[in-house]
Image: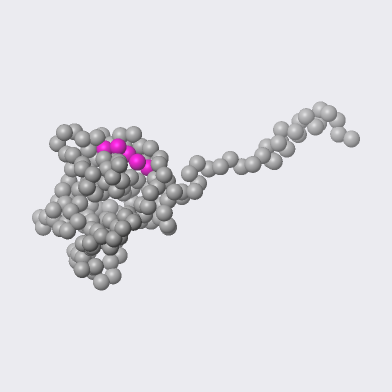
Amino acid sequence: MSSPAALAMIAPLLASLLAPAPALAGAEDPPPEVAWPQVGVVGVHRLHYDHLYLPKRPGVLPETLQVVILDDHDPRRNRIARFRPCCARRVVNEDLYFSGVEGRLTHVWRVRLESDGDDMLTEWDNGIAVLGKEFVRRDDGLIVVDLQGDGRPEIVRGCVSREGVYIYLSESSDPAPEDPEPLWDFYWYLGYDTEPTCPWLQ
């Protein structure tokens, strides 16, 4: 028969083996499998239109962040604005679909964008930001960002489909390719019919 002293020695080991494994934080939301910097969107939630939405938790936020405010009809009318990002918060996702993620995440990260007085956001603005990257306006008026760092920058575009907002980054200069395959894209389902402005729906 085992002595009380022996049982006392092995009791903690048995307890640790039988204890349930701790749950991983955010396990229901695996991060997107992408190799480039994180891309977020602005203006998709009318109650929090002055916030940036990201698919996963950001690292250290920069002091200022470029945001491209999108024109639904002509990408040459897109404009670059600057804001001070603040206070990342994990929130429930509301019909936001990010590139590199299968289906819809249950939670996303929301970052408040504070104005420095020069640039402002309205509740009707939609935009895009890339953490750790700079946007550049080309001679032809299009705004681009080198998302992969391969020297072939992607064009920033945004439009409205029949039921939602579509934002994407593409190397193609053709605004309406027959088979659009953007490097990165985002879709926000509106829940009602709209007049489409996406070129391939014209």
The quadrant of the picture occupied by the C terminus is bottom left
Residue placed farthest to the left in the image? Answer: 139
User: Which quadrant is the N terminus positioned in?
Assistant: top right
Q: Is 111 inside the magenta-drawn segment?
A: yes
Q: Position of residue 177 (x, y in %)?
A: 23, 69
Q: Residue furthest bottom?
A: 178
Residue 139 belongs to the span the image colors magenta: no
Query: Left or right of 115: which side holds 17?
Result: right
The image position of residue 5, as x and y in percent, is: 81, 28
Q: Position of residue 35 (x, y in %)?
A: 36, 52
Is residue 87 at least partly visible in the picture?
Answer: yes
Q: Work out whether residue 184 can be spotted.
A: no
Which residue occupies 21% across, 41% down?
Answer: 121
Name the residue at the top extreme. 5
Q: Is residue 31 left or right of residue 86?
A: right
Q: How many marks?
A: 0
**In the picture provided, is 7 more to the left or to the right than 145?**
right
Q: Residue at x 28, y 45 (%)?
A: 46
Q: Residue at x 19, y 56 (%)?
A: 72
Give the camera-side residue of 39 and 158. Answer: 158
Colouring method of the image: one colour
In the depicted view, which residue is nearer to us: 173 or 70?
70
Seen in the picture, residue 17 relative to 77 is either above or below; the reply is above
- Is 172 located above or below residue 46 in the figure? below
Residue drawn 13% across the image and 53% down it = 77
Q: Main secondary structure of the magenta part?
A: strand
Provide residue 110's location: percent of width, then percent of height.
Answer: 35, 41
User: Can you say whether 110 is above or below 71 in the image?
Assistant: above
Query: Which residues make up the magenta segment?
Result: 109-113
In the picture as drawn, the residue positioned furthest to the front comes out as 192
